[in-house]
Image: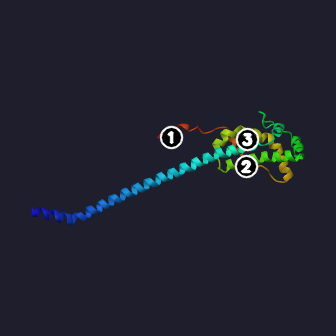
């Protein structure tokens, strides 16, 4: 029995350090794989949170901006035909007459401010362009055509271009058409059921 213990001790002395080092290296690799997995999962979680926050802010901003238009005098909106289904430009003389009245002038400014702010938010990526397009595509195109004489008149009066972002958004959406990416509701539903 003693020779077996001596052989065991001899093997343990020669290979024990190696086995201990091998075991230690395996544990280090497992720890690194675990850490890398955690970093990847955290990265995905951050990306999802950013996407969710952007979508959430889109709906909040669309709601806020929509309420801005609701506060404008309905008679003015009727005069310039924003609620009509056609997109015929309003005669510039109508705008000149409206600009003589301080209240109407202020309300026209608020309408243009709405569209300019909305356009900046979409073009800068602050709100999701696809969602905004789904909600406002027809409204933006129709309103831009109706208000273009007013924009040109105000630009001439100010001596500089006005509502450039509104024009850029209209032109962009007009060139793209209403070609929207397909809804990915099924993907969202799959994720929610996990």
Query: For this rendering, which residue is in front, 30 or 167?
Result: 30
Cα–Cα gap, marks 3 and 1: 34 Å
Which type of secondary structure does the marked residue at label 1 adopt?
helix
Q: Which residue is mark 3?
A: 140
- The numbered mark, 1 or 2, whose residue comes first in the sequence reads 2
Toward which corner of the image does residue 34 lie, by quadrant? bottom left
> Can I make out residue 50 in this image?
yes
| Label 1: few (<14), some (14–19) or many (≥20) C-alpha neighbours in 10 Å | few
Toward which corner of the image does residue 139 lie, by quadrant? top right
Q: Residue at x 74, y 44 (%)?
A: 68
Viewer-side label of 1, 2:
1
x and y percent of residue 64 in the render?
70, 45
Viewer-side label of 3, 1:
1
Q: Which residue is mark 1?
A: 192
Would residue 122 appear left or right of 163 to someone viewing this image? left
Say above or below: 146 vs 157: above
Q: Which residue is mark 2?
A: 117
Which type of secondary structure does the marked residue at label 3 adopt?
helix
Q: Residue at x 42, y 56 (%)?
A: 35
Cα–Cα gap, marks 1 and 2: 34 Å
Say above or below: 50 vs 191: below
| Label 2: few (<14), some (14–19) or many (≥20) C-alpha neighbours in 10 Å | some
x and y percent of residue 12 in the render?
20, 64
Say above or below: 154 vs 89: below
Which type of secondary structure does the marked residue at label 2 adopt?
helix
Q: Residue at x 74, y 48 (%)?
A: 116
């Amino acid at each position: 029995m003693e020779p077996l213990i001596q052989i065991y001790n001899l093997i343990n002395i020669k290979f024990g350090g190696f086995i201990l080092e091998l075991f230690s290296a395996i544990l280090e690799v497992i720890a690194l794989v675990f850490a890398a997995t955690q970093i990847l999962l955290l990265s995905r979680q951050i990306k999802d949170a950013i996407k969710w926050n952007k979508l959430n802010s889109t709906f909040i901003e669309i709601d806020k901006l929509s309420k801005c238009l609701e506060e404008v005098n309905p008679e003015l909106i009727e005069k310039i035909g924003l609620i009509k289904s056609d997109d015929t430009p309003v005669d510039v003389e109508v705008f000149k007459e409206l600009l003589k009245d301080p209240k109407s002038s202020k309300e026209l400014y608020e309408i243009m401010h709405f569209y300019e702010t909305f356009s900046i938010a979409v073009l800068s990526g602050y709100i999701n362009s696809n969602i905004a397009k789904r909600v406002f595509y027809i409204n933006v195109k129709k309103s831009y055509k109706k208000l273009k004489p007013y924009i040109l008149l105000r630009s001439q009066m100010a001596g500089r271009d006005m509502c450039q972002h509104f024009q850029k958004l209209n032109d962009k959406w007009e060139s793209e058409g209403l070609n929207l990416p397909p809804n990915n509701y099924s993907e969202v539903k799959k994720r929610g059921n996990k």
